Image: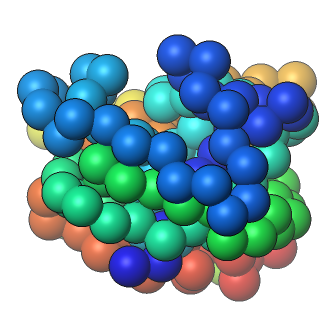
Amino acid sequence: MIVYKLTDENACSLGNTHWTIGKTNTATGEGGLCGPGWLHCYEHPLLAVLHDPIHGKFGASARMFRCEAGGQILKDDQMKMGCSELTPIEEISLPTLTATKRIAYAIFCSQCVYHDQWWNAWADKWLSGEDRTFAAAKAAKAATWAAKAAAWEAAEAAAEAAEAAAEAAWAAAEAAWAAKAAAAAVNLISCAENAMRIN
């Protein structure tokens, strides 16, 4: 199974595990997915980068490897996965994700689980580029506040990040958390690929 692994700039992951092309690293395949018994990876390179703010936190200096996963496999929907054997095949470039694309990912994930008409009207306008103002996001929030849907948090973060580029990193984390909230009901790969089409 082909998967994707993020590391720091020294090709090390959490627990100081070093990754070398052609060398298989192993783990026990025991315990919870976030524990030391699993080698963490992703089904898609976009998910690796989009979910990094709540997982490895490697940031812009991260390196990515296309890998062969083997042994035992454990998935957290499409948020991340673990395996007991992981062999890097080649190093690949990180996908380029602007703040706008990260925000779009949060919105696409949210739209899959939150169906309020006012909120979705705002989301559609944001995604089309028709209206990305903070005022429009606030109006959508006011119209749907009673629902207090978890998906709204991603939308609000997205709108604020669109207004202030300095908050782009925060929006990235919010996008990843929005995906986590929706993961059981959403095809995250589809949301990520759709987000890449947004300018």
Q: In terms of depth relative to the viewer, which is nearer, 165 or 13?
A: 13
Please state the horizontal and vertical placement of residue 111, each as a whole percent of the image: 33, 65
Kindly identify the residue that appears in the image at 25 percent across and 29 percent down: 37
Q: Does 60 sit above or below residue 67? A: above
**Quarter occupied by the N terminus:** bottom left
Q: Name the side, left or right, on which 16 lies relative to 181.
A: right
| Residue 111 seen in the current view | no
Kindly identify the residue that appears in the image at 29 percent across and 48 percent down: 84
Q: Name the side, left or right, on which 178 lies relative to 66.
A: left
Quarter of the view holding residue 12: top right
Furthest residue toward front: 23
Quarter of the view holding residue 98: bottom right
Please state the horizontal and vertical placement of residue 188, each as a whole percent of the image: 38, 67
Kindly identify the residue that appears in the image at 49 percent across and 45 percent down: 25
Q: Does 78 sit above or below residue 191? A: above
**Quarter occupied by the C terminus:** bottom right
Kindly identify the residue that appears in the image at 52 percent across and 16 percent down: 15
Please state the horizontal and vertical placement of residue 197, each as a whole percent of the image: 71, 83
